[in-house]
Amino acid sequence: MTTALITGSTAGIGAAFARRLAAEGHNLVLVARDTKRLGEQATELHDRHGIEAEVLTADLSTEEGISAVEERLGDRKHPVDLLVNNAGFGNKGRYLEVSMADELTMLKVHIEAVLRLTSAAVEPMRSRGRGGVINVASVAAFLPRGTYGASKAWVVQFTQGAAKDLAGSGVRLMALCPGFVRTEFHQRAGMGTDNIPGWMWLDADKLVAAALADLARGRTVSIPDPRYKALMGLVKVAPRGLLGGVSSRTGRKYGPQ
C-alpha cells in the first residue's frame, strides 16, 4: 500500500486530496498546524476507509516545522510515494500595504518550504525509481498579482524545471493551478465573495480528481477546469497593461489552499 503526505491537510484542497487518496486505499501522513483537527481527520479517514493515517503537527513558516516534515519524507523505512505541497497563505493588501515580516513569512512557506520538501521527497523517490509530487500553485501565477502571484509563479517554474531534470527517473512532478475554490479561505480572511461570479467557483473534490488524472498523464502543469483553461488562454494574448488592472488584493490564507 502506498503512502501520501499532504501539507495543509485539514480543510479545503488539502482535505479533498486526503479524502480522495484515502478512498483509493492510500495510507496518509497528514500535516497541519492544528493537532486537534489533524487527530479528528485521521480518525475519520481511518474509520471510513480502513487506511493508516499518521498525524504530523508542523508550522511550515518555522524552521522546526519544515525540518520535521523533511525528516519524515526522508524516512526510507516508511517511504512516501506521493507528496502534496498544499500549505500556503496570502497577505490581504497591495504591495507596501503588507508588512515585510508577513511578506517574508509567505515566501518561506511558498518557496523555501516547497523547495526543501520537494527535494527531501524526490531524493528517495528517485532511488526507488518511482514517486510523485504535486505542488499547489494558483492561476494567480499567470497574472501580475503582487507577491502572492510572484511566489506562485516561482512554484510553477520550479516544478516544471525540476520535472525536466528528473525526466526518465520514474518521478513525476506537477504544479496544480486552481482558480477560486470553495474552501475556508475567504471566511478566514474576512473577505466578501459577492463580486465573484458563481461560474468561477470550483469544487475541491472535482478539482482533486482532475489533478490526479493530470499527474497520471504526466503533465507538469494542471489547470483543472475548462473555464480556467480558456481564461488562461486569453491571458496569454491580453495586453500586459490590461492584466495590470487585475486587483492584487487577496485574503490571508494559511494552511489549506
Image: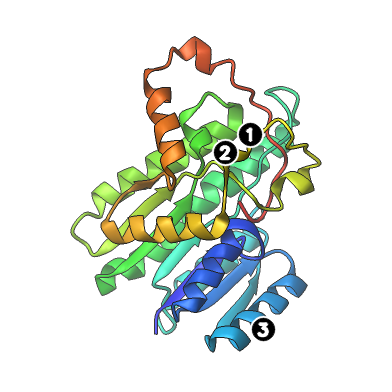
Q: Which mark is residue 43?
A: 3
The N terminus sits in image quarter: bottom left
- Measured as percent of width and height from the top left, residue 190 is found at 81, 41
The disc at residue 200 is: 2
In the displayed structure, 94 sits above or below 211; it is: above
Q: With 42 as the anchor, is 131 left or right in this view?
A: left
Numbered disc 3: secondary structure: helix
Quick check: 135 left or right of 247? left
Q: Decide which of 250, 111 is in the foreground and name it.
A: 250
Expressed as whole percent of the image width and height from the top left, the position of residue 216 reads: 30, 62
Residue type at tag 2:
Met
Q: Earlier in the sequence, mark 1 or mark 3?
A: 3
Q: What element carries label 2?
A: helix
Q: Marks 3/2: CA distance?
A: 33 Å
Q: Which residue occupies the extreme left position in the image?
A: 168
Dot placed on the residue nearer the N-terminal end, 3 or 2: 3
Residue under pointer 1: 197
Q: Is residue 68 visible?
A: yes
Separation of residues labelled 1 and 2 (CA atoms) = 6 Å
Q: Nearer the viewer, residue 3 or 210?
A: 210
Could you say where residue 150 lies in the image, as x and y percent from the top left? 52, 32
Q: In this view, does 186 lie to the left or right of 230?
A: right
Q: Nearer the viewer, residue 257 or 67?
A: 257
Q: How crowded is mark 2: few (under 14 residues within 10 Å), some or many (20 or more)?
A: few
Q: Write the residue at 52% across / 65% down.
A: 17
Task: Please report contact status of discs 1 and 2: CB closer than 8 Å, yes or no.
Answer: yes
